[in-house]
Image: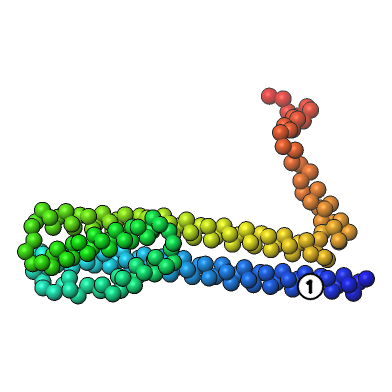
Amino acid sequence: MESWGTLAAAVVGAAIALVGQYLAKRREERAKAVELLLNSCAEVAASCSDLLYRVWEERELGLPGRVEGWDLNGHRLATARIRILSGDPALVAASEEVNTAGQALSSYWRKGVVDDTEFQVRRERYRAATDSFVDVSGRRIGVRAGSAASRAEGSEGRQDRGRRASPGTSPAGRGGDGAASGCRGHRDVPPPGVVPASPVGGGGR
């Protein structure tokens, strides 16, 4: 019987190890996905600021060709990564509004002759879209990271309970010392809803 017990303990231990490795790999993959999504959102936000600055350089400093040198391909790539990795409607909608507002501003500015009022409207729309995107991405990615951390803690807790429940690891299997020590450790804690009585003769006021 001891050999069967030892074999069962070995099988359970190996199963727990495999489950732990699988959960650790999944946590690592989720963390990488969140990190890549965060970097993509940061790239889009930085790209938006860069476009605004390039428009300002042409408008205020008279530097030609600044808007044409803007990295449109990099901006599109980061936006595509957001759509693939996120799947969040609010975040995707915010990135699309950034693209639409940016296209409206840059195409109007490149006409050469622009109305100042119309330019101000398009620029402010782009700024508002950028600010909204930064706000939405910060909140959404924070939620995703928090959910991933909670799932990781829950998985680790279940794995730890599985280890404690495997043969040969229970405190009761060691002669009950663990249970006794647990009782000793909580003997001064009253049950819920019970107010401990004051000691008799304990130092009157």
Residue 177 point in image, percent of width and height: 85, 56
Q: Residue drawn 49% across and 60% down?
A: 145
Report crowding for label 1: few under 14, some 14 to 19, many 20 or more residues within 10 A (C-alpha). Answer: few
Residue 200: which quarter of the image?
top right
* Residue 39 at least partly seen: no
Task: Please report the residue visible at 6 percent of the width from the left and 64 percent of the height from the top.
Answer: 113
Between residue 71 and residue 149, name the one nearer to us. Answer: 71
Taking depth in this image into account, of 25 and 95 the one nearest to the observer is 95
Q: Is residue 159 left or right of residue 45?
A: right
Identify the image's colour scheme: rainbow, by chain, secondary structure or one colour: rainbow
The relative height of residue 195 versus residue 51 in the rendered view (above or below) is above
Could you tell me which quadrant the C terminus lies in?
top right
Q: Residue furthest left?
A: 113
Residue at 39% of width from left, 55% of height from top? 90
Secondary element at tag 1: helix
For the residue pair 199 and 143, the one nearer the viewer reads as 143
In the image, farthest residue toward the right: 1
Q: What residue is disc 1 on?
A: 11
Q: Which of the image's four quarters has the N terminus?
A: bottom right
Question: Residue at point 45% right, 57% down?
Answer: 142
Residue 69 image position (x, y, % from top left): 19, 75
The quadrant in which residue 80 appears is bottom left
The answer to whether residue 140 is left or right of residue 69 is: right
Mark 1 belongs to which amino acid? Val
